[in-house]
Image (cartoon, grey):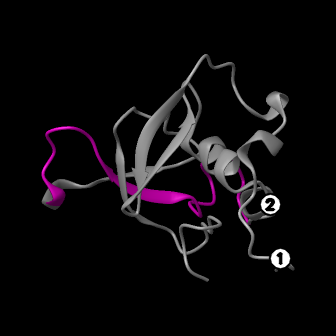
């Protein structure tokens, strides 16, 4: 589905009922860009927090069956050669994680190019 605008969604626009309860935002890196997302949430929900429309209307099953939300990531002390694959709908965000690659199905306003 195409958006009519390329403006970044304001994270505050995400309804609290979409997210698991959280007390703070944590810093992660997505394709080299530093962002803050809600702790204690699945990574796909965090992507929705960053880009409400593109993720909400994306082609995701939200339960791990379609694999359209696959990402590759690193955590502290991990070599770039050892990126871990995961499904964003199943992986809880880890403070300091670095998302190094994502499925082309994931479009994030202001981060990915379409």
Marks 1 & 2, CB-CB < 8 Å contact: yes
Other-residue count near label 1 (Cα within 10 Å), few / some / many at <14 / 14–19 / ≥20: few
Q: Position of residue 2 (x, y in %)?
A: 82, 80
Looking at the rendered structure, the secondary structure element under dot 2 is: helix
Image quadrant in which the N terminus is located: bottom right
On residue 53, the disc is: 2
Boundaries of the magenta span: 59-80
Residue 63 shows up from this direction: no
Choose the circle earlier in sequence order: 1 or 2.
1
Tell which of 90 and 102 is nearer to you.
102
Q: Is residue 95 left or right of residue 88?
A: left
Q: Nearer the viewer, residue 25 or 63?
A: 25
Give me the residue at 57% from left, 58% from top. Answer: 69
Q: Residue at x 51, y 69 (%)?
A: 103
| Residue situated in front as seen by the camera: 6 or 83 | 6
Quote the CA–CA distance across marks 1 and 2: 8 Å
| Residue 21 belongs to magenta span | no
Q: Secondary structure at mark 1?
A: loop
Q: Residues within 10 Å of mark 2 (few under 14, many from 20)?
A: some
Count of numbered badges drawn on the protein: 2
Which image quarter holds the C terminus?
bottom right
Q: Quadrant of residue 52?
A: bottom right
Viewer-nearest residue: 11 or 105: 11
In the image, residue 63 lies at what x, y percent? 66, 44
Query: Can residue 79 be seen in the rendering of this structure?
Result: yes
Q: Is residue 65 magenta?
A: yes
Q: Is residue 3 left or right of residue 11?
A: right
Question: What residue is disc 1 on?
Answer: 3
């Amino acid at each position: 589905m195409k958006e009519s605008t390329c403006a970044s969604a304001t994270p505050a626009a995400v309804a609290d009922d979409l997210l698991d309860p959280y007390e703070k935002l944590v810093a992660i890196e997505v394709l080299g860009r530093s962002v803050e997302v809600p702790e204690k949430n699945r990574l796909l929900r965090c992507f929705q927090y960053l880009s409400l429309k593109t993720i909400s209307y994306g082609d995701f099953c939200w339960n791990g069956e379609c694999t359209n939300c696959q990402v590759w990531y690193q955590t502290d002390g991990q070599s770039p050669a050892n990126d871990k694959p995961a499904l964003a709908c199943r992986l809880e965000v880890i403070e300091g994680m670095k998302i190094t690659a994502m499925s082309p199905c994931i479009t994030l306003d202001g981060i990915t190019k379409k």
